[in-house]
Amino acid sequence: MSFKDVGVRVSLRAQTMRWSRDLAYTVGLITTDGNLSKDGRHIELTSKDLEQIETFISVLKITNNKISVKSSSYNPAGKYYRVQFSNVDLYKFLLKIGLTPNKTKTIGRLKIPDKYFPDFLRGHLDGDGYTSSFWDSVYKNSFRLFVVFISASEGHLQWLENQVQRMYGLDGSLQRAKRGRIFQLRYAKKSSVILLNKLYYKEDLPCLKRKRFKIEQALGIIRRHAGMVKSVDTLA
């Protein structure tokens, strides 16, 4: 996939890289939808979601930016957005924590401080993950919720699974997707509720608003349904 504005680059104010919730979130995005150029200085992010690109630019305080747009041959009706910028300090920081150029299938464990892991994982979910929620057609009054993380690297998802289990005591299910050479790490209802509350631990957080809205709707249904079941059990 090529972009018309392939030469467009933007600048990021030079700064010492220190962990923060915002930086951890952008690392999650770069881990999934980003790319490190082989020149040792340029970083780019590509996404189908313009809001994601705009949030990325805002959080990193990128200046003089220009977003490239490209229609995909696989989905002519859809668009991909890309931003590219140069920052040697950030590039070296990303190498230090375990990211590399052409990382798609080779990425493994990353050096993410536990304190900022929820923000990193929220960026990971925004970049290459999704939630699925629905009323079960077989079991009456059963509402399903799944959180899914996707990667072409099985080793990377194994590391994610181990981190989530170690920090939160939650077990996921890692499997190869039915189509394509990708893997999925899935968390079912109870675990997904706990995990999502860890990722969205306060109101003012960088994230995709539409994705958070969908998650809050699903969690609201689960809370209301749990309350109704409790009331019925009390009366029984």
Image (cartoon, rainbow, N blue to C red):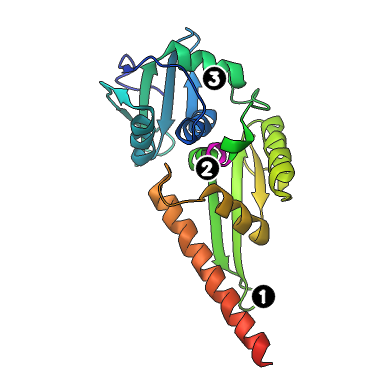
- What residue sits 47% from the left and 30% below the top? 23
Task: Find disc 3 in the rendering and name its residue.
Answer: 94
Pointer 1 and pointer 2: residues touching (CB < 8 Å)?
A: no
Q: How far is disc 1 from disc 2 in space, using C-alphas?
A: 31 Å
Pointer 3 and pointer 1: residues touching (CB < 8 Å)?
A: no
SS assignment at label 1: loop
Task: Find disc 1 in the rendering and name its residue.
Answer: 139
Q: Nearer the viewer, residue 22 or 7?
A: 22
Give the residues drawn in magenta, as a range: 118-122
Label 2 Cα neighbours within 10 Å, binned few <14 / some 14-19 / many ≥20:
many
In the displayed structure, does residue 221 sit left or right of residue 191? left
Label 1 Cα neighbours within 10 Å, binned few <14 / some 14-19 / many ≥20:
few
Q: Nearer the viewer, residue 34 or 223?
A: 223
Tell me where residue 146 appears, x and y as whole percent: 61, 56
Q: Amino acid at mark 1?
A: Tyr
Q: Amino acid at mark 3?
A: Leu
Tell me where residue 218 appears, x and y as whole percent: 51, 63
Residue 198 vertical position relative to residue 108 in the rendered view, above or below: below
Q: Nearer the viewer, residue 224 or 73?
A: 224
Tell me where residue 180 appears, x and y as whole percent: 62, 37
In the displayed structure, does residue 137 sit left or right of residue 166? left
Task: Find disc 2 in the rendering and name its residue.
Answer: 122
Q: How far is disc 3 from disc 1 in space, using C-alphas?
A: 46 Å
